[in-house]
Amino acid sequence: MRHPTDPALIRWLREAEVPLMFETMLRALLKEKPDDPVRFLAEFTESKYTPEEEEVPALVTQNVYVVRHGHRIDNFDDTWAATAARPYDPPLTEEGKATALALGKEFAEFGAEERPTLIISSPFTRCIETAIGVAKGLGLKEISVHKALGEIHDIQVLKHDTAPALETPTHMDGINISHLSSAAPPFPETRSSAMIRYSEAFDTIPDTKPCNMVLVTHGEAVARSITGLLPHLMVYDTPYCCYSVRQRSLLDGFWNVKMDTNGKIMWLED
């Protein structure tokens, strides 16, 4: 839409030999009705003026689905950690993998304006395997890994007294895995520091690409994705493969939380 004072529009008026008085009258009217000035003015002239195309974002609203990983094996097999090389980094159970695939298929049913086209995961195995399942359900061939989405680096949370040594492959189960540049969280890390890290990740990662995306992370992070914007809520349950929906207009950049999640997250209002 061209503003009445746009130089190109004024030049067109003059080249079309619109009398000065008529030009002044039209400008006044267009200030009152600026809906489509070019079409309006075209009714008064045979000129073939065509305004320059203005950039319109392909996506007006960005949806970020913050997903908790699927069922982790150590919560279902008490013997797994005893023989694991990295007991702080359990994989998914078969149920967890199936749930992740089902979630990806659920996302695939979304309309083009809401369907995610990019998946970014925590570097922990359970999250990567969840991201792979979601990618398969969506028909995507690649996921990325970002360390800022990782688990809280706390001794009690990890049940380990040294910093986690995570091994992230570049290819797994038919899906390519790329690594986004990010520093590992400090160890040990306080819960409050981790909450700040999560909030910063939710603000900055979506800026890297203006598209709908899935961020696969951990339960505390999913809760933070909500309470960081709605501090009056207390999220008390984030089951496996639940997700929140953070949404913003790409025109003004303001975030809000859509509370129509997949019906799994539980919260209370203060």
Image (cartoon, grey):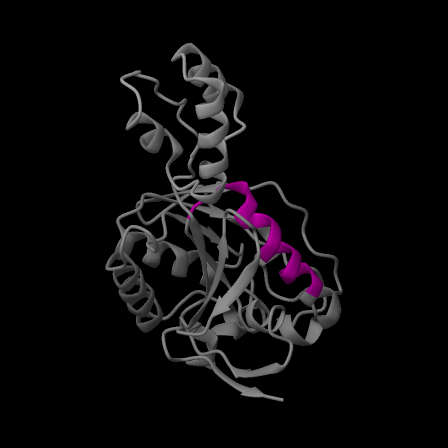
Location of the N terminus by quadrant is: top left
- Image quarter of residue 241: bottom left
What span is colored magenta in the figure? 196-211
- Image quarter of residue 42: top left
Foreground residue among 19 and 99: 19
Percent position of residue 200, x then y: 66, 56
140 versus 263 height, above or below: above
Q: Does 193 sit left or right of 37 as displayed? A: right
Location of the C terminus by quadrant is: bottom right
- Image quarter of residue 154: bottom right
Residue appearing at x 70%, y 56% in the figure: 185
Foreground residue among 213 and 97: 213
Percent position of residue 194, x then y: 69, 65
Residue appearing at x 53%, y 69% in the figure: 222
Percent position of residue 38, x then y: 36, 29
Foreground residue among 192 and 172: 192
Q: Does 247 sit left or right of 137 as displayed? A: right
Decide whether residue 210 is among the magenta residues: yes
Residue appearing at x 36%, y 54% in the figure: 132
Count of numbered labels shown in the rendering: 0
Decide whether residue 241 is among the magenta residues: no
Percent position of residue 191, x then y: 71, 72
Q: Does 101 sit left or right of 20 as displayed? A: left
Q: Is residue 85 visible?
A: no
Q: Is residue 114 visible?
A: yes
141 versus 103 height, above or below: above
Q: Report the magenta stretch's main SS.
A: helix
Residue appearing at x 60%, y 65% in the figure: 151
